[in-house]
Image: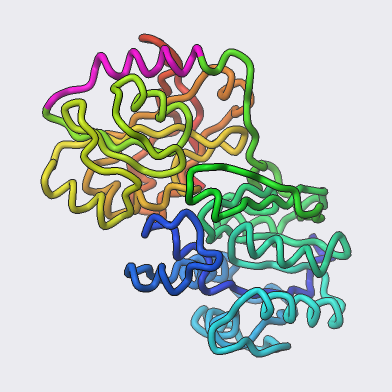
Amino acid sequence: MALLQKIGFFVNPVAGMGGAVGLKGTDGVVNEAKKLGAQPVAPKRALRFLRALGDNHGLSIFTCGGSMGEDELKEAGYTGFSVLSTPQKISDATDTIDVCRSFLAAEIDVIVFCGGDGTARDVVSVTSDALPVLGIPAGVKMYSGIFALSPEKGAEILQHATEIAETEVLDIDEKSYRLGTLSTSLYGVARTPVLGTYRQAGKCSFFGDDERSRQEIARFLTEILRDDTLYILGAGSTTAAVSSYLSVPSTLLGIDAVYQGECVGQDLNEQGLLELLRTYPKAKIILSPIGAQGFVLGRGNQQISPAVLEKVGPENLIVVATPQKLAGTPTLYLDPGNPDLALHFGENIQVITGYAMARRMPLVLA
């Protein structure tokens, strides 16, 4: 879109760090995430976006100093950009707000940020619907419709957007989320560049006869579980139904593990999963996609990291979903964190939908 030539670009360098270490978010727990060995996520995803964007394409780029944009632009080989603000030693929401105010004063055409729902919330608290905003996904949850499917898709949107659409900006109460309660709130409406299906949908819950379908899925899975295999259960009510059927404890919004009908790990992080896989080399992962968004991997379950997925093997991924959820989720997506791993998946995937029932669903690599 020719009108989007003056770009405000910044990175939340701590976004997503709470994912692999099992903190289900990073808001307010950055230091704890670092103590658990969390590594930066957003800078790498920002580089993927910038490299996919290629040369400057005649763009005028404005950014924030240091690790909030300047460093990533330099590493990607960009020159001639302008630094409008300097972050604190440890960046926080105040820096996001400051740089967004600078963008408004500079009368840019669009803000492109690399972060998660918390970052999006801070952005729209300043911009409201004054100018378009595009998110490059780097957080843990990313329930808002403001995000591109992937960094590469974000570059495509910026270069070729065909329209501007209104979308909701959502965020959750992370303290409640860590305790197993999902509470999502609407924090604003943003204008977002659109290109086909390159932007994700917002999360949606489905009701109706879901509970009966979940019980049928759980009954079927418990009958086919093998005694020589470790089963890693992802987040959500469908996988929780499997734990309930086995009479083992579960973490509704976390990652658990079951072996021979017994819980051998609860609310696991990446390191905990890797340790279990050294004890139980034969394993399968059972996951359910996020409603409407369709993400099976890469949203809210970063504990299942590229290292974990490679150890288990992409062929040992079991996807489950009720027919009601699939009716509102026409396409499934994978964002496994490693583009090379994505190549091991085909263009569709089998989804278990009931007792001895399954259907194949389109699968898109984000």
Assess whether residue 144 is covered by the magenta stretch: no
Vertically, is 225 above or below 105?
above
On the rendered structure, is 38 left or right of 253? left
Q: Nearer the viewer, residue 118 or 246?
A: 246
Vertically, is 160 above or below 230?
below
Q: Nearer the viewer, residue 183 or 336?
A: 183
* Res. 93 image quadrant: bottom right
Residue 81 visible here = yes
Q: Quadrant of the N terminus?
A: bottom right
Where is residue 124 drawn, in percent x and y?
77, 63
Where is residue 41 drawn, in percent x and y?
45, 66
Vertically, is 336 above or below 131?
above
Vertically, is 288 above or below 59?
above
- Which residue is at a point 84% across and 82% down the rendered structure image? 106
Where is residue 135 drawn, in percent x and y?
65, 60
Where is residue 144 drawn, in percent x and y?
67, 49
Q: How many marks?
A: 0
Residue 198 visible here = no
Magenta residues, start to end: 212-227
SS assignment for the magenta stretch, majority: helix
- Which residue is at a point 54% across and 59% down the rendered structure image? 139
Q: Nearer the viewer, residue 352 or 49?
A: 352
- Which residue is at a point 40% across and 39% down the rendered structure image? 251
- Which residue is at a point 34% across and 35% down the rendered structure image? 233
On the rendered structure, is 247 left or right of 324? left
* Res. 229 image quadrant: top left
Assess whether residue 217 is covered by the magenta stretch: yes
Q: How is the image coloured?
A: rainbow
